[in-house]
Amino acid sequence: MFMLGMAAYSYATRSSFYYYLACQSYQGGKLKETFDNLDLAILTNPRNFNAYYLRGIFAYEHQNLSKAIEDLSRAIKYNPSSEKAFYHRGLCYWRQKDNTAALADFDYAITLNHRYEPAYFYRGILQLIEHRLPEAIEDFTQSIRMQPDRAKAYQYRGQALTYQGQQEEALADFDEFVRLNPTSFEGYYNRAVLCYNLAMFQEGIADFTKVLELDPNNASAYYGRSNTYINLNHSDTATLDFEQARVLEPEYPIDRVDQHGFFHAGLAHYHHGYSQVALEYLNKALRLCHKNHDNSMHKIVADAIQTIENTAT
């Protein structure tokens, strides 16, 4: 019995040594050595949680999601109290578009550790995708409380707040996102379209202009700035932006999920006398608003369509 115990101890020690070597290889970017040492760590101790976990992470980083899920599931079997293993397996399911399984793993990670911020952040993204807006807002709020410098949490919470019509709160989140990530055109774009809806036209001009400095081929920003100039009675400048957007759009089309881009394209075409084309754009925007549960924008787009149809009759 003593000899059996010593043998088990020896195997566990060897397994830990191979795991140590794997960590060293991993940090040095030696891919094959990392895998080989992890395989040996598991071979000498099939219950080595750390080896399964690291091999799962490694597989995830190299887009082998099925293998990652297999290894992380083994890790969970040998250490069911690891919130990190559940969280990373949730990421794998999320990448596979299995939102139900991903949500279950993020839920359990949070159950195991109520202060595990990454699980709140990614659960918030899933809640937003599934259009559970109050739940998404709460998860992003928890993420921000624990990691106040996570810029994307402000951006996504701002989007969820916008969809619910809480535009003032959304504007504050977009302000913070821009402060934390000043080189991202997305933050300025989100804030610009919100400024337009709030009739903050001078601020909207500044943000659309910043978008175009960072992303010069952004047709949506040209359409948006054109409409903003219209509201400031700068018709000549508005026309220049409208024509530039029309030149760009065939090669740099509006993002297919951007209801704001299609709205501003439609409104700009209406302002420049293309009512039928305007309605095509606006109806695309309306369908996206419905799909994204963007109730606030849905009303704005529907009102624009009604105005154009009334004018035509």
Image (cartoon, rainbow, N blue to C red):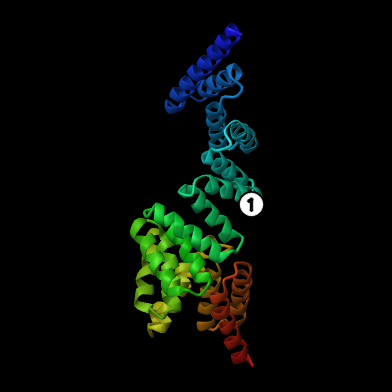
Residue at 56% x, 83% y is 304
Quadrant for the C terminus in the image: bottom right
Q: Residue 115 in the image: x percent, y percent?
A: 45, 49
The residue that disc 1 covers is 99
Q: Residue 149 in the image: x percent, y percent?
A: 37, 53
Please say if 191 is above or below 35. below
Where residue 66 sits, quadrant-wise, is: top right
> In the structure shown, which secondary structural element does the residue marked by tag 1 occupy?
helix
Using the image as rendered, state which of residue 164 and residue 208 is in the foreground: 164
Looking at the image, residue 139 sits to the left or right of residue 174; the answer is right
Q: Residue 191 in the image: x percent, y percent?
A: 41, 68
Please say if 175 is above or below 57. below
Looking at the image, residue 125 sits to the left or right of residue 181; the answer is right
Looking at the image, residue 69 sits to the left or right of residue 245; the answer is right
Residue at 43% x, 23% y is 24
Using the image as rendered, state which of residue 207 and residue 213 is in the foreground: 207
Where residue 185 sits, quadrant-wise, is: bottom left
* Residue 219 appears in the figure: no
Please say if 112 is above or below 197. above
| Residue furthest out toward the top | 3
Which amino acid type is marked by label 1? Asn
| Residue furthest out toward the front | 1
Q: Residue 219 in the image: x percent, y percent?
A: 48, 66
Residue at 52% x, 79% y is 267
Residue at 46% x, 21% y is 20
